Image (cartoon, rainbow, N blue to C red):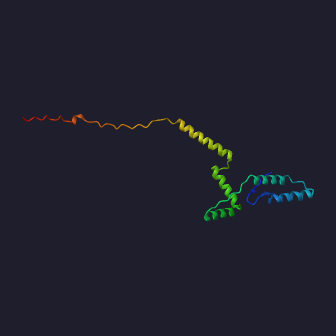
Amino acid sequence: MAEMKIDLDDEKILIEGRWMSGADIKAEIKARVNADNYDIEDLTQALKMLENALKNSVPMTFRVPTELADKLNAMANKRGESVGNILREALGYYLSEGGEISAAELEREEEEETEEESEEVEEEEFVPEVEEEEEEEEIDLTEITRPRRRRRRR
């Protein structure tokens, strides 16, 4: 069975060339069984996939500037997808820096970064700050003349 597309916003799955809700799939299964057509394996798998996807998703609401909303709507129309799907894809890309990543992988990466940072701190040598002594100016002694003695007045 090929991977099926799921539209979380409309709560539908693409099966046999049609977008079907859970209720649509159940009705189709019932109709096939009543007609003694027991070719329902793809439908039952699709129903399980849809129910699992819906069970493991959380609705989120947030505001965006009008300009961004217009761009999102235009992109969704161009691609024939929902705005929610575009946002999920963009968020997944952003959080994974280019590819899908699981929460466990994110946690593991954070732990590795923390370990690397602590190793870097341990590797740094402790060098106390010491004020550098200013270099003394070299004096050319040949240029110095001997002071003349002054005679005392009597």
Give the quarter of the image for residue 61: bottom right
Q: Nearer the viewer, residue 112 or 41?
A: 112
Q: Is residue 77 above or below residue 91?
A: below
Farthest residue to the front: give it. 154
The foreground one among 39 and 135 is: 135
Q: Nearer the viewer, residue 154 or 36?
A: 154
At x 25%, y 35%, the residue is 140
Indicate whether 10 appears above or below 135: below
**Residue 9 location, x and y as percent?**
73, 59
Q: Is residue 51 left or right of residue 99?
A: right
**Quadrant of the rendering where the C terminus is positioned:** top left
Residue at 61% x, 64% y is 67
**Residue 130 at what x, y percent from top left?**
41, 37
Please give left or right for residue 8 compared with residue 39 in the image.
left
Q: Position of residue 102 (x, y in %)?
A: 68, 47
User: How far across and how far down the image is residue 47, in percent?
Assistant: 81, 54
Q: Is residue 34 left or right of residue 22?
A: right
Would residue 30 be visible to someone looking at this image?
A: yes
Q: Quadrant of residue 32?
A: bottom right
Look at 76% across and 53% down and name the residue there: 55
